[in-house]
Image (tube, rainbow, N blue to C red):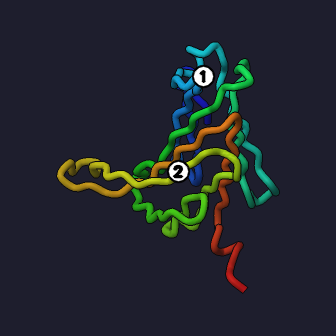
């Protein structure tokens, strides 16, 4: 799901938003809104196979200059059911729901954690994984049933 007005996109899985991200453009080392830069956010989502083996999410912008870079900063939000996530390689693995969100090689990227308050209990915090990526084009891959399909031999 893409929202060009707010310059963000969301990944829905099983009725829950499992990843959401804002998109900015970096031009001449300045962070700009996509519309402010005279461009348009373009997110393409493609399923690989009838049973959703892999979902590829391509994030780019139309109307950009050759030196522009896209900045994606996103996180796995609180869905109401506990998400047990961990940083693995170049991605996020959710062991409680058995899915993996990874980043294709190429962009400058970081995966960090931040403490956020729990809904309804501001005194309690939980750690949330934050993905930040910067490149002319960013490719994310979402793989449901990750461990079920990729069992060690």
| Residue 118 against residue 6 in the figure, above or below | below
Task: Point out the tag, 2 or 1, that comes first from the N-terminus.
Answer: 1
| Residue 41 against residue 128 in the figure, above or below | above
| Residue that sits furthest to the left in the current view | 123
Residue corresponding to mark 2: 110
Q: Secondary structure at mark 2?
A: strand
Residue corresponding to mark 1: 27
Nearer to the camera, 28 or 22: 28
**C-alpha separation, residue under disc 2 versus residue under disc 1:** 20 Å
Nearer to the camera, 129 or 147: 129
- Quarter of the image for the C terminus: give it: bottom right
Q: Residue at x 55, y 64 (%)?
A: 93
Q: Secondary structure at mark 1?
A: strand
Nearer to the camera, 90 or 44: 90
| Residue that sits furthest to the right in the current view | 49
| Residue 81 against residue 17 in the figure, above or below | below
Query: Viewed as shown, does residue 52 lie left or right of 7?
Result: right
Q: Are discs 2 and 1 less than 8 Å apart at CB?
A: no
Q: How many marks?
A: 2
| Residue 88 against residue 68 in the figure, above or below | below
| Residue that sits furthest to the bottom in the current view | 153
Q: Tell me residue 109's x, y (percent).
A: 57, 48
Q: Residue at x 58, y 27 (%)?
A: 26
> Is disc 1 surrounded by few (<14), some (14 to 19) or many (20+) residues within 10 Å?
some
Q: Residue at x 26, y 55 (%)?
A: 125
Q: Residue at x 71, y 73 (%)?
A: 149
Q: Tell me residue 3's x, y (percent).
A: 57, 27
- Quarter of the image for the N terminus: give it: top right
């Amino acid at each position: 799901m893409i929202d060009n007005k707010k310059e963000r996109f969301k990944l829905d899985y099983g009725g829950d938003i499992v990843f959401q991200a804002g998109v900015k453009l970096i031009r001449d080392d300045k962070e700009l809104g996509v519309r402010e830069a005279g461009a348009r956010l373009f997110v393409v989502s493609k399923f690989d196979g009838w049973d959703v083996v892999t979902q590829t999410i391509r994030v780019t912008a139309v109307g950009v200059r050759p030196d522009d870079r896209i900045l994606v900063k996103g996180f796995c939000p609180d869905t109401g059911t506990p998400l047990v996530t961990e940083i693995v390689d170049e991605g996020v693995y959710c062991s409680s729901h058995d899915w993996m969100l990874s980043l294709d090689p190429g962009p400058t990227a970081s995966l960090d954690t931040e403490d956020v308050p729990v809904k309804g209990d501001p005194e309690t915090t939980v750690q949330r994984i934050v993905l930040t990526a910067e490149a002319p084009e960013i490719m994310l891959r979402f793989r449901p049933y990750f461990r079920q399909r990729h069992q060690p031999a």
